[in-house]
Amino acid sequence: MKIDILTVLPKLLEGPFADSILKRAIDKEIVQVGVHDIRKFSKDKHQKVDDYAFGGGAGMVMTIQPIHDCIESLKAANEYDEIIYMTPDGEQLNQQISNELSMKKNIMILCGHYKGVDQRVRDHLITREISIGDYVLSGGELAAAVLSDSIIRLIPGVLNDETSALSDSFQDDLLAPPVYTRPADYNGWTVPEILTSGHLKKIEDWRFEQSVLRTKERRPDLLERGKKH
């Protein structure tokens, strides 16, 4: 898979891809991540990428020309399954979306800033708009990193144990069950006996029951959503 991220602040994206699972995926050449500075495509002599909104109002708007030219430059070299804009008013990211996107070959992600991008970018260049939650960030870089992480970890070969991704929270619309590790007794706080029994079928049943209970307590809306599928 190839993920290209368009931003006016490329240094913000250095950290998320420089360590842990994402770095290993890149080093193993399972995924390619390109970070592209939109300013380099500006025709303004000062590499300006924003301007005042027509009609007035506070805040600046990202201009269409450098974004369009950056997108077209990348499209000349690759075909993209999705060109995604990270925005608070997009469809809210969930596990099903991440699962779907992890099956794609090439994805482009545009990070917004200021008051957002010229609407014509959204109308004519973007294929999908995604939000990571009902709140506003200073820019789309962190949201793009969250989206990328949620996708990349699902690609076969990225995780050491591929089944671990299948048991994550939100797979099958259930939260993950409680997990424990050694020692089995710490300060008198003990691990449920079933987990040390060695009886795999009973352990699986216990974990499923705990997932359902936890989901009922914390996210009953997921159970309702599961009934509709």
Image: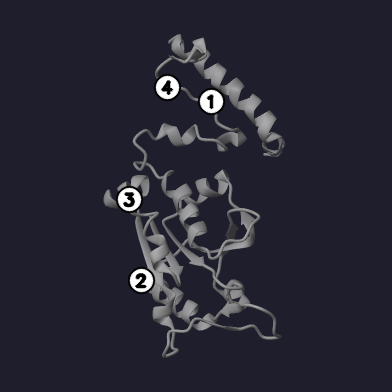
Residue position for label 3: 23
Residue position for label 4: 181
Task: Answer with the quarter of the image where residue 39 lies.
Answer: bottom left
Mark found first going from the N terminus, 3 or 4: 3
Q: Is residue 209 above or below residue 128?
A: above
**Which mark is drawn over residue 202?**
none
Q: Residue flagged by tag 3: what amino acid is it?
A: Lys
Q: Residue at x 45, y 9 (%)?
A: 197
Q: Where in the figure is residue 225, as x and y percent of width and height? A: 69, 39
Mark found first going from the N terminus, 1 or 2: 2
**Which mark is drawn over residue 178?**
1
Q: Where in the figure is residue 119, as x and y percent of width and height? A: 62, 76
**Residue count near mark 3 (Cα–Cα under 10 Å), binned few <14, some 14–19, many ≥20:** some
Image quarter hosting the N terminus: bottom left
Q: Residue flagged by tag 1: what amino acid is it?
A: Pro
In this view, the mark in front (2 or 3): 3
Q: Where in the figure is residue 128, as x and y percent of width and height? A: 57, 62
- Mark 2 element type: loop
Mark found first going from the N terminus, 2 or 3: 3
Q: Residue flagged by tag 4: what amino acid is it?
A: Thr
| Left or right: 41 in relation to 52 | left
Residue position for label 2: 77
- Mark 1 element type: loop
